[in-house]
Image (tube, helix red, strand yellow):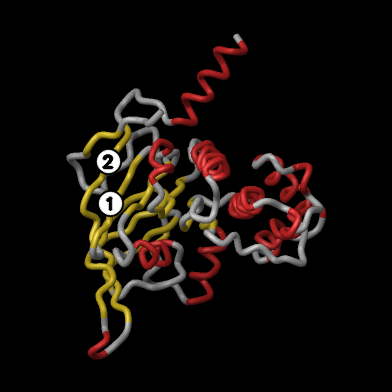
Amino acid sequence: MTAAVTKSETPAGVAATSATKVMLEARDIVKDLGSGAGKVRALKGVSLKLNSGELTLLMGPSGSGKTTLLSILGCILTPTSGTLTVGGRPTSELSPEALANLRRSHVGFIFQSYNLFPTLTAEENVRLALDVRGSRGSDAVVAAQRALQKVGLRHKLKSYPANLSGGEQQRVAVARSLVGSPSVILADEPTAALDSENGVAVMSLLSQIAKDRSRAVLAVTHDPRTVPYADRILRIEDGLIVGEERRAEGVETVHELARTRKRKANA
């Protein structure tokens, strides 16, 4: 079943409602790549806000600027011009070290290729995200185990990536993105390497995670299977946001429909 979305009459930078909080804001982001005759303007003035409690999809064709924008939002690339605010803190005047600290504190990443270390167990891969934040010892172990439990992998703590399915590896990656309690989770094509069943499972998980009012989730994707899980869809073409669609008021996402059915079945 596909959740209905409606065309928005407001720009992608629309203000959050009273029930939400702006976790990340980009204003007039321009990014030039290369130099001289080979210089390309990948982003041409992108503005958007990511609101807490929402799963936003960023969709567009290859070469539209999706990955470049994601890297800027994640404080990996710096914009040529424009402003980025993450967790209420502007990034423009931060030193490289302060920017890295902001990224570690506020941003969780999920990659298409999982990016798990093959010689580390699922638990150890998740703990790495805490290690870079300076959190170690028994507290880090407990936090990693809880994160894996949230994604349904409590029984795979000691498993190595080679012994996990693609869907399980991606869920470990989701747990790793969650373990530091970031205010923003950025996912780059999270279902592209997965079959239909595992892709649906990962999107259902991201939809559930996005319901947390202390967090915003953005997924870059071209996968139409992801659409029913979204609260909002942003369309990007040629380095510009060209459209926004928002789920119609009162229409449930696929995750919410499944939860409603389960509640009724157990009543």
Amino acid type of disc 2?
A: Glu
In the image: residue 218, left or right of residue 196: left
Task: Residue 180: tell me if it is visible.
Answer: no
Q: In the rendered view, does 108 fall on the left or right side of 39? A: right
Mark on residue 235?
A: 1
- Left or right? Give the position of 78 relative to 184: left
Residue ID at (62%, 54%): 173
Q: Which residue is mark 2?
A: 245
Residue 209, horizontal then vertical, whole percent: 54, 40
Amino acid at dot 1: Arg
- Residue lying at 43% horizontally and 37% vertically, measured from the top left: 229
| Mark closest to the chain's N terminus, 2 or 1 | 1
| Alpha carbon distance from label 2 to label 1 | 8 Å
Question: Residue at 49% of width from left, 76% of height from top?
Answer: 96
Q: Residues within 10 Å of mark 1 (few under 14, many from 20)?
A: some
In the rendered image, residue 196, in percent from the top left (x then y), is placed at 52, 43
Q: How many C-alpha atoms fall within 10 Å of the one at disc 2: few (<14), some, or many (≥20)?
A: many
Q: Are marks 2 and 1 in contact (CB under 8 Å)?
A: yes
Please tell me in which quadrant of the rendered image residue 2 appears: top left
Find the residue positioned furthest to the front.
195
Q: Secondary structure at mark 2?
A: strand
Compared with residue 160, is residue 246 higher up or lower down, i.e. above or below?
above
- Which quadrant of the figure contains the C terminus? top right
**Coordinates of residue 215 in the picture (x, y in percent):** 49, 44
The x and y percentages for residue 164 are 71, 52
Q: Secondary structure at mark 1?
A: strand
Q: Which mark is residue 90?
A: none
Q: Is residue 221 visible?
A: yes
Image height of 194 relative to 78, above or below: above
Q: Residue at x 65, y 60 (%)?
A: 129
